[in-house]
Amino acid sequence: MKLSGAEIVWECLLREGVDLVFGYPGGAILPIYDALTRYPQIRHVLPRHEQGGTHMAEGYARATGKVGVMLATSGPGATNLVTGLANAMMDSSPLVAITGQVPLPAIGTDAFQETDVTGCTLPVTKHSYLVTRTEDIAYSIREAFYIARTGRPGPVLVDIPKDVQNRVIEFHYPEGELRLPGYNVPGKAHPKEIEAALDLIHSAKRPLILAGHGVLMSGAMEEIRNFAEITQTPVALTLLGKGSFPENHPLCVGMMGMHGTAAANQAIQQADLLLAFGMRFDDRVTGNLKTYSPDSKKIHVEIDPSEINKNVKVDVGICGDLKMVVRQLLPKLQTGQHQEWIGQIRDWEEDTSERDILLQLAAHPDGKLWAAQVIAELFRCTEGKALTVSDVGQHQMLEAQYYPHTRPHSLLTSGGLGTMGFGMPAAIGAKLGRPEEEVWAIVGDGGFQMTLTELGTAMQENVGIHIAIINNSYLGMVRQWQEFFYEERYQSTPLKNPDFVKLAEAYDIPARRVSTKEEIEEAVAWARSIDGPTLIEFVVVQNDIVYPMVPAGADLHAMIRRPKPSESPDFENNPTAI
Amino acid sequence: MKHTLICLVENKPGVLNRVVSMFRRRNFNMDSLTVGRTHNPDISRITIVMEGEAGDGKKVVMTLYKLIDVIEVQDVTNIPTINRDLALVKVRTPDAYARNAVTDLCYERGAHLVDIGPEVTIVELAGAEESVESFVDALHQFEIVEMVRTGRVSMGRGIRTMEQRDYKSTRFPTYTPSMNGGSAEHDDE
Ligand SMILES: Cc1ncc(C[n+]2csc(CCOP(=O)(O)OP(=O)(O)O)c2C)c(N)n1
Ligand SMILES: [Mg+2]
């Protein structure tokens, strides 16, 4: 069969099972776009900016478990991918980005719209290809998909010069094994490693599981649950680990880290065994490494060997696929009882709930709308069954605290890179991948405006996401740092915002504004009744604080807590003051 | 301390860039780097000497394994190896006296005179770094006008070679758990 390089690209995508791609055309990728007219079975979604497109592809990938695909032209199209690729790299999301490049003879001449995109993206991709022969396109794309989705997943970029796209060759799809001598996908653990882990597990008195994104990616949810129940080990979650273990499970102690639950952080500090499953001891979850969980033995099961002993030295490091490794452990586990330990954690949890802003507001209503109330109401009105996609900031942490997740892959958020502007486009991608889900994009007024152009995409493709803007007229999280650590000098954090309702209406997206708690239920019901995108702006208190907070680099147990009513002298008059 | 790493990589464009970029990105300090072919035309071999703390060798090895084109990495710092460094030194030899003196020195040290001109002489020494070092010191009695060194290349002693394991899927190396069960050390920087 005689095919052009451009047609070969689509042939290969079809063979990878791709039926939806995101992309933005331009000169150097026009042959691929023209060839797309001959592949009507593939749906193409046009974002309004390539960054938005990469976030959509990532949202799609994380919601479906498939590889997300993003196309872009050379030069500015390709450089606009960088943030999205970096985000996918940090959160280990499988993406394949295909970029057009100037024709081979023009490479290196500073030709119009030439950028060294494989160079620009080198540190933010798992791997990349500059394809110099039409014959190599199929191999490169096959490898790209394989590398993107296996091992520790990540983004792979394939850069294809225009003349390579245009050349017509006799095409045979390369079947057979890929030749990647330097690439190995870790699997099971060595029996000695299992023995060593079991020794620690069975002698622990205060064990704690730290469940991360790896649990979801290796599909080890059931195994972890069985492990926890057999050994009666409590489970703390990373932000990206949410959904890997049901948060309504009695053994779940909630999220760990900077804005985690006090109980989870205290448990980490007091544990005598940490079982780190598919997580990487990011500084946002460890705080000060010198004082991190000082009395515990540590078992780390992780697919990326470079993560083992990188930040935290461990006693047993197992490089492997989490699901396989836990399956090796399960039949050898002895049932455990840790009543004292679990009782201790319960006490910490009670102490936490006493400080809860919702309880304090319930006892002393102030008539204002607080962001935590919005999230809690959203949880109630959606019966906790929505797929939520949060942006970055206070609302993201409040989502994590007040929208408990019980299903895998029901929260998507930018964890490792903390990319403002991720939320809304990622929600579009998630909804396109899982149309049966009720998808809520929970975004801040700041972050929303970084990628709000994608309202156009939601409109054009009629993607039925619900956008909840938590509008505090501030870059709230930065404002919080300024309040705590910069003596309340609010430099460059107040926002003068557009009328978000009118803005949505300009895009033909039904929208409402809500400024009291009482209106929430009705507004959410209204949004849910509409087939297509909707937007609700929640006007919330401006000077809110997310508690608890571990200051950057501080000891994990040195949390700044919301005072208990009994400790707050002025509580009657000012119940939510610090 | 200095670490010596040997790295087998696929002989493809851009691979050296990936390796070097990893060192820059992770803030590891490279002392020297040599790269060349092996007897297998598809494989290049890189020797890297880097400055770092005791645990850094392992960290670099693990991070290098993340690169798809890296086939095998070995930290040979603490295993018996043959190390060689090659120096070309151009010294000023304006008269017969100087030329004779350089010739004598080369003979003494096992170095070669590789080019003799009317003004300058080029000498070559390949050897362990210390002998190259002391040879260069001795050459300072003349005027050194130009010098180049390759940096270290290393090869492990004995039958165990790296190439024997090439092109077979090797499992990622993992950490053998400490059998004494002692508590993990914590970073104390
Ligand atoms: C692209 C980007 N720029 C800057 C930041 C730093 N940053 C983190 S949170 C935040 C404030 C976010 O404000 P908003 O979206 O309104 O959310 P809020 O915290 O008010 O809920 C900023 C500026 C970031 N994370 N990402
Ligand atoms: Mg805000």
Image: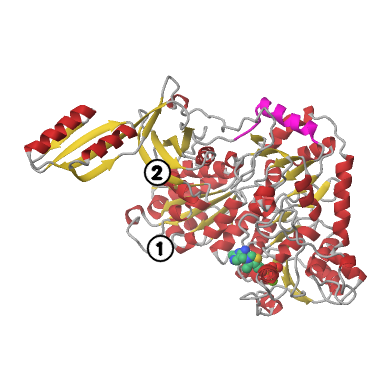
Q: Nearer the viewer, residue B35 or A93?
A: B35
- Measure the C-alpha gap from mark 1 to mark 2: 37 Å
- The residue lying toward the viewer, choosing from A226 and A453, is A226
Report if the beta carbon of the residue with label 2 is closer than 8 angstroms to ligand 1.
no
Give the labeled residue for mark 1. Answer: A113
Q: Position of residue A267 (x, y in %)?
A: 79, 47
- The residue that label 2 is drawn on is B31
Camera-nearest label, 1 or 2: 2
- The quadrant of the picture occupied by the N terminus of chain A is top left
The chain ID associated with circle 2 is: B
Three-letter residue code for mark 1: Gln
**Left or right of A461, for residue A141:** left
Disc 2 marks which amino acid? Asp
Q: Where is residue B80, by image quadrant?
A: top left
Q: Is residue A215 magenta?
A: no
Give the SS element for disc 1: loop
Near mark 1 (Cα within 10 A), the count class, few <14, some 14-19 or many ≥20, is some
Left or right: A318, with A470 as reference point: left
Question: Which range of residues does the magenta coloring cover?
Answer: A186-204
Label 2: which secondary element: strand
- Could you tell whether A363 is left or right of A534 in the image? right
- Is residue A89 shown above or below A523? above
From what the image shows, is residue A303 above or below residue B110? below
Magenta span contains residue A195 = yes
Number of other residues with Cα within 10 Å of mark 2, as a class: few under 14, some 14 to 19, many 20 or more: some
